[in-house]
Image: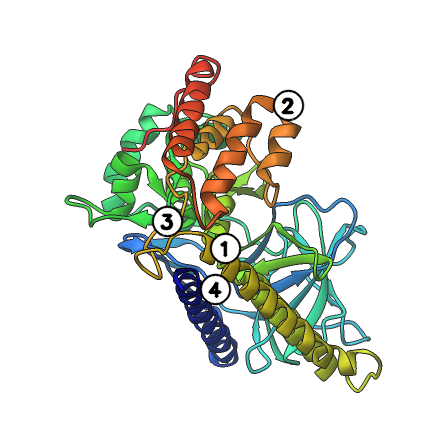
Amino acid sequence: MLVAAVAGYGGHIVLHRLQQTLEQTAFEYIFSLVQRDMDPFRATTAIGHLGNLKFSDRTVLRVEPRDGLQVPFLLREATYDIYNSSTWLATGAGFTPIQPDADGETWKFATGRGPGERVTVSAYLNRGRGVLALPGGAFELDRLAVVSVSRNRLGAVRVEEGLGLITYTALFGPDGPLDGPPIDTDLRIPAQEAAVVAPIAAELGLAGVPPPEAVQRVEGFFKQNFRYSLWKRERPRHGTALGEFLQTTRAGHCEYFASATVLLLRAAGVPARYAVGFSVQEWSRLERRWIVRARHAHSWALAYVDGAWREVDTTPSLWADAERDEASVFEPLRDLWSWGGFLFSRWRWSEGESGVGDYAAWLLIPLVLLLVWRLYSRRHVRRGNGEIRGSVAAPLRPGHDSEFYLIARRLEAEGRGRRPTEPASAWVDRIQAPELRPIVALHYQYRFDPAGLDASARAALRSSAEAWLRDHEDRVPAAPRTG
């Protein structure tokens, strides 16, 4: 009787969460149909936002595999040059039309360029228009079936009168023509932020050093002294949120890192801009291509060094792991739904081509039902054998305080950080650290087993991790300051 009650309660929880997931997925699909275009003139950041930031698992871009593609790989949507109270603005950013070649699907930003590298991206357009996600240094777009393409001096490329789903190939190389030369605004620092930025720039000795050296010092400053966090407890008591990030908390998300990097580089006399877009980092075994989720949205700096704009990304690489840990247990179901929608959209806007695409979306229906049943069965059994939790949804995910994250941070400081999408077990094998395998096993159980760890196993995880950290304390730089 008791077993049946526990199993029934566990099943109720799973069904409740499944309902929430399906409702959220449907909402995101509807929202994707009515959401406004990305604004290339204004970017309102979450700097100063209180609480924990949440990001969607929704797939927004797809990138075709190719040899030589190094991940993480940045795709930029827009760039801004003026910072004001947690908002970035683009000045003098009017758009200029680009004329297509005779085929109507090739758009060149410059002539006489070499072959360059290639990346193929699939993206949805809202009402036939949008801002493209492009690699830095893009100089040509191929197979882009839209009526008009325009660009601004800050590298944003806007398309209009296209299909609901477009697939385009971007050719790119060093010193691409998209970004205009620096102007006075690329050195401007708001008065409120200058009071904090100037002393740090002096501490780093940025005055008068060559731009490459200034970039290197700024990168080292963030790598050695800051950590990634999506959580903010309270408003700053004095000054601005960005000033508090630089002086006190030294923890934040990519918008903090990118904004602070831009202002520090400007204090060094290096023209710099704020860029937004996405980080390509997740391989889909289901689709056999790279997928980009809404949570992969990213911000970084552009620095003008040796006559060209260079990407400067100071956000700790662990940001991808932190946001991946927030993923829903039903993410595979969402991915299957998203893939089905992509296949249907590709068929719908394929200009009447026939074939298996006509039926691919319908063939996914039994797969969705099978996946729902398997998820329900697995969670049903596990909940039936474990204790009943006190609440359906906790504010923090299990294992958020695992000491393994301290080890990961230490290895990151040592230059042996975890690669995006790399399993922890494969990571410790790659860096030849077999002593970490039992710690990883306990960490995985703590993070992903619904029953968690009992008291003795939890103590073993803590003591093993602390022992490893003590043994390696004198081998690496000091641990990052947390404020």
Are there few (<14), some (14-19), or many (20+) residues within 10 Å of tag 3?
Answer: some
Residue at left offset 44%, top offset 23%:
464
Instruction: Identify which residue is drawn at 66% across, 74% down.
Output: 340
Left or right of 302, for residue 397: left
Badge 4 marks a residue whose secondary structure is loop
Q: Nearer the viewer, mark 4 or mark 2?
A: 2
- Disc 3 or 2, which lies upstream in sequence? 3
- N-terminal of the pair, mark 4 or mark 3, is 4
Binning the other alpha carbons within 10 Å of mark 2 as few (below 14), some (14 to 19) or many (20 upward) gives: few
The quadrant of the rendering that contains the N terminus is bottom left
Observer able to see residue 413: yes
Query: Would you say the residues marked 2 and 1 are in contact, meaning their CB atoms lie under 8 Å apart?
Result: no
Q: Residue at x 56, y 82 (%)?
A: 127
Task: Return the disc, 2 or 1, that comes first in the chain's sequence.
Answer: 1
Q: Nearer the viewer, mark 3 or mark 2?
A: 2
Give the percent coordinates (x, y) of residue 221.
Answer: 41, 29
Q: Given the image, on which type of amino acid does mark 4 rest?
A: Ala
**Which label number is shown at residue 382?**
1
Q: Which residue is mark 2?
A: 432
Question: Whole-Å distance between the Cαs marked 3 and 2?
Answer: 31 Å
Classed neighbour count for the residue bearing mark 1: other residues with Cα under 10 Å, few (<14), some (14–19), many (≥20): some
Amino acid type shown at disc 3: Leu
Q: Nearer the viewer, mark 1 or mark 4?
A: 1
In the rendered structure, the answer to whether residue 335 lies left or right of residue 454 reads right
Residue on which the image places disc 3: 230
Disc 4 marks which residue?
93
Alpha carbon separation for disc pair 4 and 3: 31 Å
**Callout in the foreground (4, 3):** 3
Q: Residues within 10 Å of mark 4 (few under 14, many from 20)?
A: some
Nearer to us of marks 2 and 1 is 1
> As shown in the figure, which amino acid type bears the numbered disc 2?
Gln
